[in-house]
């Protein structure tokens, strides 16, 4: 098949282009699987995007576009454009991406399925204040839609309304996003990968081991823990295959699949969960089209299920094709 791997570039300048590891890994893997592969990297030029796709005429777009131009939510309209161009692509479409990126809407959909989520309030600039009742301090304040732990750090956990409003104001100003305050869920943290459409299946849970985390700071995957390789937070966290009794593993996997379906995620995704001392499982967020890098938690959990990287990439391709195949 002719497959184009579509990705975001930091700048439009072709000469300085540098692809993320995941782009090279996916392209190489697809070639090894016998496909004819091209990579199309675009920063924010819609014309280049359209002509690049028109020239390549792929049978399938392997979509790794995470943003567009300076817009961190630009991945949504890009999938809409792929739809308009009549192209088939891997992962979720504009509607599904919108639902899972908005952590307030996500919770409303989870509520209908009776899936637990932290009680919350949305501090929106354009809509009325939304809250699900009395919130108990401490609260965790984060951007409503941005991901990759943008805007999440030491100050995210607040114990009073003054600190709460300071964080809300900072998020609105610095990230140009609405703010979301959630009840802080103390407990173990798990990432559960899910693969599939009609018969979505959960992969073995990965646990975030906070054992080496500095004392006195809340154990959360903030931006330091995720990206700053020299920080104590980064060094103090490890992703490990979760060691769990069968019954608990099955419960985590069931919640993950239920949340994945509630959000109508397509092909693949990852559900972030917390488990309290009393055994309650809370959904923190659903990541449609999650990070697919070889050493990502998602690939790690697939490997634990006996799905090595080439087979994982192949499955994503096949799931996308099956989905389009069914539609006339
Ligand atoms: N309500 C909460 N209670 C406890 N911890 C939380 C809560 N919300 C977020 N966290 C912590 O902050 C981290 C990042 O939060 P979240 O997953 O919502 O953000 P994100 O930026 O979208 O992350 P990702 O990079 O996974 O897309 C979580 O992994 C968890 O450690
Ligand atoms: Mg997360």
Image (cartoon, rainbow, N blue to C red):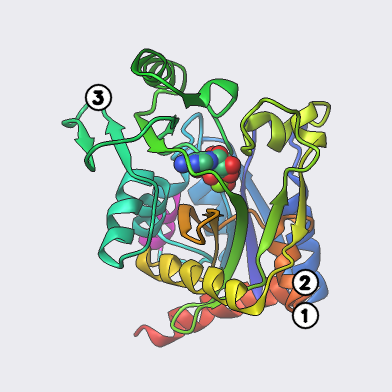
What is the distance, in whole Å, between disc 2 and disc 1 at their CAs? 5 Å
- Residue 47 visible here: no
* Labelled disc at residue 252: none
Some atom of ligand 1 lies within 8 Å of the CB belonging to the residue at label 2: no
Question: In the rendered image, which residue does mark 2 sit on?
Answer: 303
Residue shown at 51%/35% (left/top)?
44
Instruction: Give above or below for 188 relative to 259.
Output: above
Query: Secondary structure under badge 3?
Result: loop
Q: Residues within 10 Å of mark 1 (few under 14, many from 20)?
A: few
Location of residue 74 in the rendering, given as x and y in whole percent from the top left corner: 45, 41
In three-dimensional space, the C-alpha distance between marks 1 and 3, rounded to whole angstroms, equals: 46 Å
Q: Earlier in the sequence, mark 1 or mark 3?
A: 3
Within 10 angstroms of label 2, few (less than 14), some, or many (20 or more) residues?
A: some
Tag of residue 306: 1
Specify whether 86 is left or right of 28.
left
Does the magenta segment cover residue 83?
yes
- Please name the residue that numbered disc 3 is placed on: 125
Asked whether 216 or 29 is in front, the reply is 216
Quadrant assignment, res 31: bottom right
Q: Residues within 10 Å of mark 3 (few under 14, many from 20)?
A: few
Asked whether residue 287 appears in the rendered view, the answer is yes
User: Which of the image's four quarters has the N terminus?
Assistant: bottom right
Region rendered in magenta: 78-85
């Amino acid at each position: 098949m002719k497959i184009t791997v579509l990705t975001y570039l930091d700048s439009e300048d072709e000469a300085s282009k540098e692809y993320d590891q995941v782009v090279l890994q996916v392209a190489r893997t697809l070639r090894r699987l016998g496909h004819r592969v091209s990579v199309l990297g675009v920063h924010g030029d819609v014309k280049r995007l359209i002509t690049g796709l028109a020239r390549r005429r792929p049978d399938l777009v392997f979509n790794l576009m995470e943003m567009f131009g300076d817009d961190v939510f630009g991945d949504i309209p890009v999938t809409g454009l792929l739809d308009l161009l009549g192209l088939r692509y891997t992962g979720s479409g504009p509607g599904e991406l919108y639902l899972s990126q908005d952590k307030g809407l996500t919770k409303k959909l989870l509520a209908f399925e009776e899936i637990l989520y932290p009680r919350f309030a949305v501090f929106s600039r354009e809509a009325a204040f939304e809250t699900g009742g009395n919130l108990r301090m401490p609260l965790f304040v984060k951007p409503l839609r941005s991901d990759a732990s943008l805007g999440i750090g030491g100050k995210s956990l607040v114990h009073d309304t003054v600190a709460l409003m300071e964080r809300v104001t900072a998020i609105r100003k610095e990230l140009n996003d609405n703010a979301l305050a959630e009840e802080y869920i103390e407990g173990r943290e798990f990432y559960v990968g899910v693969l599939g459409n009609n018969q979505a299946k959960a992969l073995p849970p990965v646990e975030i081991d906070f054992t080496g985390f500095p004392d006195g700071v809340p154990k959360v995957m903030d931006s330091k823990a995720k990206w700053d390789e020299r920080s104590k937070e980064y060094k103090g966290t490890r992703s490990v295959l979760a060691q769990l009794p069968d019954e608990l593993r099955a419960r985590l996997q069931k919640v993950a699949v239920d949340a994945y379906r509630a959000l109508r995620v397509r092909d693949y995704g990852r559900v972030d969960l917390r488990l309290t001392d009393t055994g309650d499982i809370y959904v923190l967020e659903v990541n449609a089209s999650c990070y697919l890098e070889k050493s990502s938690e998602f690939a790690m959990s697939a490997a634990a299920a006996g799905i090595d990287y080439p087979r994982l990439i192949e499955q994503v391709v096949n799931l996308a094709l099956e989905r389009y195949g069914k539609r006339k």
